[in-house]
């Protein structure tokens, strides 16, 4: 009676034990030869070719040994090679040691003027002399002409910059300080550039007088205009 109870308990435990799933099932880990055959069939279908069973077999290049799996015959190996070639669209390359590489051809688009041997074959002292003479005939000398005269009747700020020597901010002329800063900011904002402000400043009595309030520090330069760049050109 005790043996029967123990046997029934063992059967109950075996029934409760979970089954170990097949980790390779359903993910392609079956027979590898079957996988290769299915792959070849798929490649042939994509390229519009016939199946492996009706394909014309090809022989591997001479000197190249082919490895096969156990149970595969040479016809299947050749069929797989043919399918790979058809899928790639390229011709097979014989990589055997007896296959010489193709000759290297010079690129006609690259100049060989730095190759002394190549230049010496087609050029001579006489041809150089003729080329120099042709270049001399094509050479044209452009004579300089006088600079155009200024058409503006306003003051020349370049001449003014070259006639001054004081630095910007260095007071030379007396100015009124009543409301000078606010007037300076308001009036200078009316001009697109310091050059235009300096031209208007000189046209209205500057630098001795500052009727427009553009030079509150009395250095003779309106709206922070700087004569240094013009002076630098003359010194160079």
Image (cartoon, helix red, strand yellow):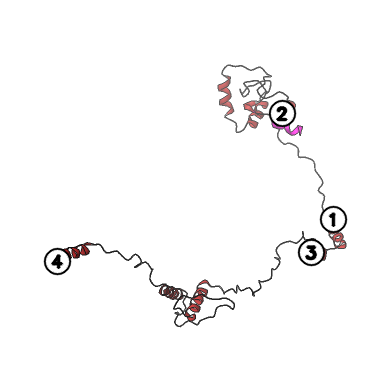
Q: Earlier in the sequence, mark 3 or mark 4?
A: 4
Q: CA distance from mark 1 to mark 4?
A: 123 Å
- For marks 4 and 2, the one nearer the N-term is 4
First of labels 1, 4 by sequence position: 4
> Which residue is under mark 3?
118
Q: Is residue 144 above or below residue 29?
A: above
Tell me the residue that label 1 is attached to: 136
Which SS class for mark 2? helix
Query: In the rendered structure, which disc, 3 or 2, sits on the residue that comes first in sequence?
Result: 3
Which label belongs to residue 119? none
Front-lying residue, 197 or 103: 103
**In screen coordinates, is 60 left or right of 14?**
right
Magenta span: chief secondary structure: helix
Q: Which quadrant is the C terminus positioned in?
A: top right
Front in this rendered view, residue 50 or 9 = 9
Secondary structure under badge 1? helix
Circles 4 and 2 in contact, beta carbons < 8 Å:
no
Which of label 4 and label 2 is nearer to you?
4
Q: Which mark is residue 161?
A: 2
| Image mark for residue 4 | 4
Q: CA distance from mark 1 to mark 2?
A: 45 Å
- Where residue 191 appears, as percent x and y from the top left, is 60, 31
Residue occupying image coordinates x 46% and y 73%? 43
Q: Position of residue 208 (x, y in %)?
A: 69, 20
């Amino acid at each position: 009676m005790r043996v029967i109870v123990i046997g029934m308990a063992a059967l109950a435990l075996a029934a409760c034990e979970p089954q170990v799933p097949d980790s390779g099932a359903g993910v392609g880990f079956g027979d590898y030869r079957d996988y290769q055959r299915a792959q070849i069939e798929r490649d042939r279908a994509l390229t519009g070719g016939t199946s492996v069973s009706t394909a014309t077999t090809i022989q591997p290049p001479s000197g190249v040994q082919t490895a096969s799996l156990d149970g595969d015959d040479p016809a299947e190996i050749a069929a797989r090679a043919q399918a790979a070639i058809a899928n790639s669209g390229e011709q097979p390359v014989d990589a055997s040691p007896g296959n010489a590489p193709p000759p290297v051809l010079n690129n006609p688009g690259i100049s060989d003027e730095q190759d002394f041997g190549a230049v010496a074959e087609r050029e001579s002292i006489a041809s150089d002399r003729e080329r120099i003479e042709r270049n001399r005939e094509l050479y044209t000398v452009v004579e300089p002409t006088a600079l155009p005269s200024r058409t503006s009747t306003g003051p020349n700020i370049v001449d003014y910059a070259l006639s001054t020597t004081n630095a910007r901010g260095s007071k030379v002329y007396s100015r009124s300080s009543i409301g000078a800063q606010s007037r300076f900011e308001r009036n200078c904002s009316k001009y697109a550039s310091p050059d235009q402000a300096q031209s208007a400043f000189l046209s209205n009595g500057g630098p001795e007088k500052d009727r427009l309030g553009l030079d509150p520090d009395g250095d003779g330069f309106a709206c922070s205009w700087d004569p240094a760049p013009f002076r630098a050109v003359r010194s160079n």
